[in-house]
Amino acid sequence: MSQAELDKLIRSNYEAGFSTTVDTETLPPGLSEEVIRFLSAKKEEPEWMLEWRLDSYRKWQEMPSPGWAHLHHDPIDFNKVSYYSKPKSLDDAPKSLDEVDPELLATYEKLGIPLHEQEMLAGVAVDVVFDSSSVFTTFKEKLWEAGVIFCSISEAIQNHPELIKKYLGSVVPKGDNFYAALNSAVFSDGSFVYIPKGVRCPMELSTYFRINEANTGQFERTLIIADEGSHVSYLEGCTAPQRDENQLHAAVVELVALPGAEIKYSTVQNWYPGDENGKGGIYNFVTKRGVAHDNSKISWTQVETGSAITWKYPSVILRGDNSIGEFYSVALTRHMQQADTGTKMIHLGKNTKSTIISKGISAGRSSNSYRGLVRISPRAENARNFTQCDSLLLGDTCGAHTFPYIESKNPSATIEHEATTSKVSDDQMFLCRQRGIDPEKAVSMIVNGFCKEVFKELPMEFAVEAGKLLEVSLEGAVG
Amino acid sequence: MTLSASDLAIDLKTQALANARRHGSDGDALTDLEAASFPERKTERWKYTSLKALADGHLNAVANGEISQPLPALSEFVVTINNGQLQGSSLPAGVNLHHDAPVVNGLQTPFAAYNGAVCGQPVVLEVAANTRIEQPIHLQIQSASEAPAHCNPRVIVKLNAGAEATVIEHYHAEGQALTNAVTALITADNATLTHYRLQGEQANTLHIGTLIIDQQGVSKVDSYQLMTGNRLRRNDVRALVNKSGAELNMKGIFVVRDKSHVDNQLCVEHAVPNCQSDQNFRGLAGESGKAVFNGRIHIHPFASGTNAELSNKNLLLNPGAEINTKPELEIYNDDVKCAHGTTVGQLDAGQQFYLQSRGIPAAEAKRMLSLGFVNELLMALPDAAVTEWAQPWLEAELTHASPAGDAA
């Protein structure tokens, strides 16, 4: 494919680029103990929660911001970020969808998230985060019947303090890393899920995230607890309107899989990546981690196409014997996007297994890195890991990098790692075009094939969305 | 009192600078050393290797012990460097030994900078253009010191256009000597170099080495790097594949046992189009040995048509041993073929069963299989003299590394 055609394709606009004007109550930019107190008071949080936040803030203040990732950006001024924003009309919470701000609903409509339809047809409960607080939680009652708790984390702090006290910060401690500490101090809202013993969650749980207010950082906190022998599949999807200023996002996701439980966590991330000159776009610094107890399983699947900067390493601590960790990832970067993403599999228990499949696609002048760690501790007898990371480069101005750390301290463990780098070959293109497939479709097809292994891990509805997303991104990104 | 890693780093630098000034070094060499920073606990490239052994004061003294078990000559052409000083040489026609060292590109580590500031007389072996040296040149680099002390050998092998040679870079150290070596291999157009790096120093010695392979011309370099662990072994190998059409092959074996340590940091830089590189390393760790392997392939933006591969397979022989490996790719061009593969595992239980079912004791079976694991590379060595020397050496190491007992 010629450079000219490539260039033409790379210049397409962000489809989800629009913004909604909703009356919001936004805190002026800046971070201090007062801001945290205000935030906590606004949410009517108990004293222990405020202490927890303040402790995190003090830890954060002493930490240097990490510089080890293969990312280049100007230092972030955390005092230019606003730490609280909430749609005003939410103060008198809606009892049904009819009461929801119509403009909000219209936003979701534009994004193709038909809330009504989903409620009735798809059977998916949606906990929608619009900026910092939950708008509405559907199907709550149906889930309640099964004993499943699915609510915003603010509600959980009010209604289930015993679970929050026990598990919040148990997987990602307050001072785990710079961005996790920041999140612990100022987290705005997020989802909370508890699946009781032996329950198979009757539906796939899903949250759509949306960044709306300019200059507003979003700090979601998600906590999922799957009690013994339970099963849950959780879907997280994101898309943000076009903005010129860089927006900061530092989320924390904690998963706890108790003995015999299974958690499947899928993400499609399509935040505004910035324009072709690297102007604007979301800075995405995420800490995602799960602890797998005996005989449990945690599976991460992610499709990352958005954000100017992605710094994200969904990890699994395989603490229990016979536990399983999985990581399937597709990361697509174009224009000036930078992604440094991968996973950590920490094998502590006996007979633990982990699988890592990572597909990186880079185009434009972007940079796409896989960074991973597989650690086998001395007592992880018969641990097993398989890692495959493949990179696809589209054009000769992008970069694809691999930094896999492998550490083994147990002689009965088996670890395999392989990585390849390739491009869309002329042969493949020739074959497609010879059969009358136009170049753009052909590339899309080839890339889709390249990602197949990951897409098949996604829940059906998500797989369709991911495929579509990739196609849309490729329209503007590929040759 | 034990020093913290950052205090040690400052100490080492202070000592290194003092030594360099006393040595009368100046100019670029001193500037480089002044700019260098010694690794601290959080220095990424030194993540798995601690320099705390150097707190014994190796930099405070210069090694000058007698070599009690000198290396046997593996060829009729020998160059001997003892405690960093040239002792003697017998060289064929066409090879010129002098001390007028060319600038060595690509040096990065603080220890290489230190070597540059204090090495004194570098040994330069220059092979005349269009000359083929049939016999290998055996470079014996030896050091000895009962107390902690160091030496700084610096060797530059330069092959002019059309030259062909084999160089065996062979290290030996006794007592508590630290060998802080820098070796550079420079090849011009149409040169063919076969290089061996044999490192089997005694258990209490230390080795910090930098190897630069600078392919300035369309040349072929085959490098074979065989090593066992000692108290501290750190190899920084950097290959600059700098002329279109150049070819580089690196193969290596490392065996650690007892409490020994090996840290290999390899980096192959492809800066121009249409070059080829292949790296194949195998590691074994037994007893409480610790092995580190970091293999990096860096493809620069204009290096289209590059074909680069890396393979690193490792065996962990028993609990207590440790292997840390990281194959890295850094790629800025789409028209390349790049792949790496790494494994860490154990001896195949089926193969062990097969041997034991035929009456071979468990320990012997384990040893045989370990040897088989490295034999593929060992048998591919083109010079019989090296194979003959290396095989019993590695075999002895493997016998210790795979102790009798459990055959799991």
Image: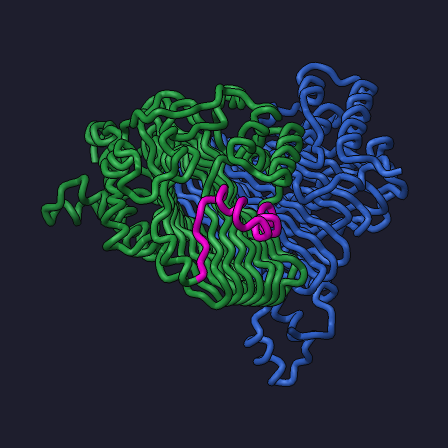
Q: Is residue B15 above or below residue B138?
A: above
Q: Name the quadrant containing residue A214.
A: top left
Q: Residue at x 65, y 71 (%)?
A: B366
Which of A311 and A378 lies nearest the eye of the viewer?
A311
Q: Quadrant of the N terminus of chain A?
A: top left
* Residue A230: x %, y % from top left: 47, 64
Which of A325 and A158 lies nearest the eye of the viewer?
A158
Q: Colour of chain B?
A: blue
* Residue A164: x %, y % from top left: 57, 48
Going by the image, does B163 lie left or right of A358? right
Which of B32 and B164 lies nearest the eye of the viewer?
B32
* Residue B136: x %, y % from top left: 62, 46
Q: Name the quadrant containing residue B165.
A: top right
* Residue A243: x %, y % from top left: 34, 24
Q: Residue at x 34, y 32 (%)?
A: A240
Q: Is residue B122 visible?
A: no
Question: Residue pushed farthest left?
Answer: A436
Q: Is residue A318 above or below residue A279?
A: below
Q: Residue at x 85, y 33 (%)?
A: B62
Q: Residue at x 40, y 43 (%)?
A: B307
Q: Is residue B200 magenta?
A: no
Task: Give the chain coloured green.
Answer: A
Q: Quadrant of the C terminus of chain A?
A: top left
Which of A240 and B198 lies nearest the eye of the viewer?
A240
Question: Residue pushed farthest top?
Answer: B27
Q: Is residue A102 above or below residue B198?
A: above
Q: Is residue A57 visible?
A: yes
Magenta-colored span: A147-170
Going by the image, does A198 lie left or right of A391? right
